[in-house]
Image (spheres, rainbow, N blue to C red):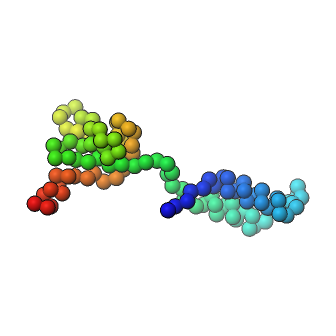
Amino acid sequence: MARYINADELKNYIKDQLVATVPIPASHTPTYGETNIMEQIDAVPTVRVGLKTGHWIKNYGGKYVCSNCGMDALFDNTTCMVASRYCPSCGMWMCEPIVDLTERQDEQG
Ligand SMILES: [Zn+2]
């Protein structure tokens, strides 16, 4: 399982550790290594943390329901449901592929 850390907190921790272990005069200019590690931390790709994702489930009645809360998707101006990017009921980000239960039935039958 991934372990997420706060990059700014890590940088502050490293700076504090350097100060705690090596007396650094006020006139100290950061070495290449000190600067480089901070740049490397900033260069690490970021990820969205804590943002739950879900998907629409197209059921046998042709309705889209949310994988998280089970509520129906909204209708457009006609009688068609819209598989929107966010669930209008729970706010889940619906970035995962739609699960079409009617296709599964076709594959099995
Ligand atoms: Zn929902």
Residue 104 shown left or right of residue 49 in the figure: left
Q: Quadrant of residue 3?
A: bottom right
Residue furthest to the left in view is 109
Q: Nearer the viewer, residue 13 or 29?
A: 13
Q: Nearer the viewer, residue 14 or 68?
A: 68
For the point 27% across and 42% down, the residue is 65
Residue 67 shown left or right of residue 3 in the figure: left
x then y, percent, for residue 90: 38, 38
Residue 22 shown left or right of residue 65 in the figure: right
The quadrant in which the C terminus is found is bottom left
x then y, percent, for residue 101: 20, 52
Q: How many marks?
A: 0
Residue furthest to the bottom in view is 33
x then y, percent, for residue 45: 54, 59
For the point 22% across and 52% down, the residue is 100
Q: Nearer the viewer, residue 108 or 76?
A: 108
For the point 16% across and 47% down, the residue is 60
For the point 86% across and 60% down, the residue is 24
Q: Quadrant of residue 15?
A: bottom right
